[in-house]
Image (cartoon, coloured by chain):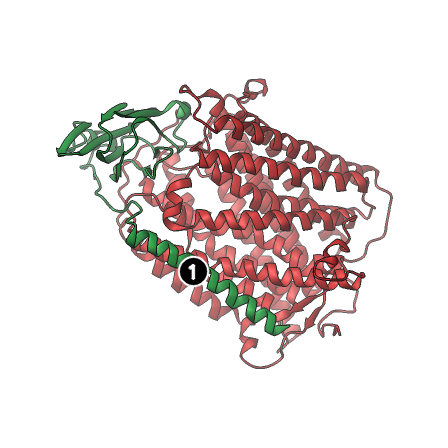
Chain colours: A green, B red
Amino acid sequence: MVRYERIFFWFSAGMLAIFLCALGYVTVFMNIHLPGPAGRIIPKSGQNCAAAVLTTAPFNRPGVREIAPGKYEAVMLAQQWNFYPFKIQIPAGAELTFRVTSVDVIHGFFIPGTRVNMMVLPGYVSVETYRFTRPGSYRLLCHEYCGLYHHTMSAEVAVK
Amino acid sequence: MSTPVAYAPERPFALPASQRRIISLMLYLGFGALAVGVVNGLAQALNYADIDIFKAFPGLHSYYQGLTVHGVFNAIILTFSFANGFVALTCARGLNRPLNQGLLWATLASMAGGAALLAGAILSGHASVLYTFYAPLQAHWTFYLGLVLIVLSTWLTSANLFLALRAWRREHPGERIPLLAYISVVTYIFWDIASVGVACEVVLLLLPWSLGLLPGVDPMLTRTLFWFTGHPIVYFWLLPVYVSWYAIVPKQVSGALFSDTAVRMVFLMFLIIIPIGLHHQYVDPGISPSLKFAVAILTFIVFLPSLLTAFSVMYALEIGGRRSGGRGLIGWFFRLPWKEPAVAAQLLAMLGFMLGGITGLMNASYNINLEIHNTAFVPGHFHLTVGTAVGLSYMGIAYWLVPFFEQKQLWGKRLALTQAWCYFIGVLIFARGLISGGLAGMPRRTAISLIDYPLPAGWHEAGILTGVGGTLMFISAVMFFVVLGMTIFFGRPAKIDDIPFTDTIEPPVASGWLVNLDHFGYWIAVAIVLCVVIYGPVIYQHIPPQMNSTGFTNY
C-alpha cells in the first residue's frame, strides 16, 4: 500500500506541474500578464492622499486620448462612488490602455467579458491594456466594496 | 492486520468534567455566532435573487452591514471558537492529560469579550467594513480591539497546548508524540506563525489609527499584512476538520488510518508553506508579477497535502467499508454508516470539498484569476470549502461532540440526517448559481438587488439558483439548531466516557530520520525562512510606511 501512496503522490505532483506549465505557456506565449508595479503617488508632507493624486500628472486631467493611430489611453480616477470619466468611446479594434488610481479608498476595476480586472488603491497606479475587437457597450464595474453605494459605481466603455 | 498503536492509552480519558464544560461553552459560543451569521446569510443569498429583505431586519441598515455580520460571525467567531474548543479537546485526549484550567477560562473570556466587542461595533453600524476590513475604510476602534481579543484567544489556546505537550514530554522522554496530539499541536504552531501578519496590521497600524494616534495608513501595507494571514487562515479553519477526518471519522466508520508518517507529513507541509497570501493580490498594483508567479507555484505545492488527504482519508474509509462487507471497486462506499448523522454530514462535506478544492485551484491559477477575481465565483468556491468542508463537518462533529459534552443521546437522528442532506443539496445549487454568475461577470460583495444599471445576461438565472440554494442551506441550519437545542435540553441521559479516535495500521517509526518530524524547531525555522524570502521584498518596499490615507466611514 505504501507503493500506491507513492504512485498517488507522484501522479498528483505531475498533474500540478502540468497545470503550472500551462499557466507559464499562457503567460509567455499568449502574452497575458497580471498587473504589476506602475508607479506610485507619494504625498508631500502635510498633504493628504486625495490632494496629491488630484495634482499629479496625468491624474490632474482624467480623460481619453489617442496616443498613436488605433491606440488610446484612458486616464481614470476612481472615487466613491464613480469613475471619471464615466463614459469612454473608442472605435472597434482599438487598443485601450487604462491608467487608473483612487483618490479615497480601495476600489475594483473590472469589465466583464474581458480580462480587464484590477484592484485600484489610493496613490498606486494600476495599468492594463486591452484590445476591444467586438463593437458594443461594455460595463466597467467597481468590484471591491468601497462604502454604502458601492453597487452603483460603474462606467461604460462604448466600442463603435 | 491492524496493529494497535503502542501509545494508545488504556487508561480512561483524564479530562476533568469542569474542563469539559469550559470547552463545551467555547463551542456553544461559536454555534451562537453561527446562528446570527446564517440569518444574515439567507438575506445575502436572497439579495442575489433580487430580493432585498434587509429592510425587514431590525437594527440593520445596509446590505454591507449584514455582509459584515455574516463574514465576521461565521468565518471568525465560529471558526476560532470551534478550533479553540475542539483542538484543545483532541490534544488533551491525544496526550491523555488535563489542560491548564486557568488558561482555558482565559481563552473563553478572551473569545467572549472579543465577540461582544465585534458584535457591538458591527450591529451599531460603526464597522460595516466587511470581513477583510480594508483600510482606508475605517471601523470603530472597538472592532479592532475585538479582533485583537479573538486572536489572543487562539494564542492562549496555543500556550495551553504547548504546556500540555511539554509536561507530556517530560513524562515520556524519547517517545513519539501521539498522532492525535501531534496534529492538534501542529495546527496551532502553524496558526501562531500565520497570525503574525494580521496581528501586526491590527495592533501596530489599524487600532492606533482608529484611535487617532496615527494620521493615516498605507492601504497597500495593511492589505498585504491582512493577506499574509488571510490565506493561511483558511487552513486554520480546515485543519481542525482534518483532525476529525484523519483521526476520528475512520474510527466512526470502523476503518483505520493507514500511515502515521503520511499524516504527520501532510500537517508539516501546511506548517512550512505559509507565505502564499499574495495570490489574493494577483491583480493588485505594486507587486511584481514574477513574485506573484512564485507564489502561484507555492500555492500549487500546498495543494499536494490536500490531495494526499483525499488519498489517506479515502483509504481509511475504504478499510471501514470493506470491514462492513463492501465489495468491488466502489461497493465499500455504500457500506459506510450513512445512517449516522455524524458520519454522513462529514462524508458529504468531503464530497463538497472536492469541488471546493478544484475551484480553489482555479482561483490560484495566476492569470486565470483575471477572469474570476472578486466575482461571485469566489464566494461560490469558498462556500464549498469553508461553507461545506468546514461548516458541514462542524455540524457532523457536533452530532457526537454535544452528546459527549452533555452526557446525553443525540435527539432527532433522522432530522439530523435530513439536515446534512438538505445542506449538501442546498450548497450545490447555491454554489452552481454563484459560480455561473461569476463567470458571467457578477461581482461579489455587491448589493445586486440594488444596482442601477440593466442586469447583464446570465445574472438573473445565477441569482435565482443562489437564492434557492441559500434558502435550503438556511432551512438546514434551522434543523441543526433544533437538533442541538433539543439534545442539550431534552436529550435522554447517556454515559459517554471517551471520544472516538483511530488506530494507525503502520505505527509511528521509533528510529531513523522520520523521528525528526516531532522536532518542531526545524520545521518552524524552515517556515520562517520561507516567509521572509517571499514577504521580505514586499514589506521592504513599505519601509518607512507612508501613513497618508485618512479614514473613511461612509458606509
Q: Nearer the viewer, residue B125 or B212?
A: B125
| Residue B429, picture quadrant | top right
Residue type, mark 1 in image: Ile
Q: x%, y% of residue B358?
A: 52, 50
Using the image, name the chain to which the residue with label 1 belongs: A
Does residue B396 lie above or below A72 as drawn? below
Where disc 1 sits, the SS reads helix
Residue B500 in view: no
Q: Nearer the viewer, residue B323 or B247?
A: B323
Query: Residue visible at 61% across and 32% down?
Result: B470
Disc 1 marks which residue?
A18
Query: Residue visible at 55% across and 59% down?
Result: B307
Does residue A65 lie above or below B432 as drawn? above
Horizontal arrangement in the rendering, residue B389 relative to residue B420 (left or right): left
Q: Nearer the viewer, residue B26 or B453?
A: B453
Does residue B159 lie above or below B23 as drawn? below
| Residue B203, picture quadrant | top left
Query: Residue visible at 56% across and 41% down?
Result: B383
Name the image quarter holding the C terminus of chain B. top left
Q: x%, y% of residue B323?
A: 79, 64
Residue ranking furthest to the bottom: B512
Residue B115 in view: yes
Q: x%, y% of residue B348?
A: 67, 47
Name the image quarter holding the N terminus of chain B. bottom right
Horizontal arrangement in the rendering, residue B51 relative to residue B503 (left or right): left
Classify mark 1: residues with Cα within 10 Å, few (<14), some (14-19) or many (20+): few
Query: Residue visible at 28% across and 34% down?
Result: A133
Does residue B157 lie above or below B430 as drawn? below
Q: x%, y% of residue B127?
A: 46, 30
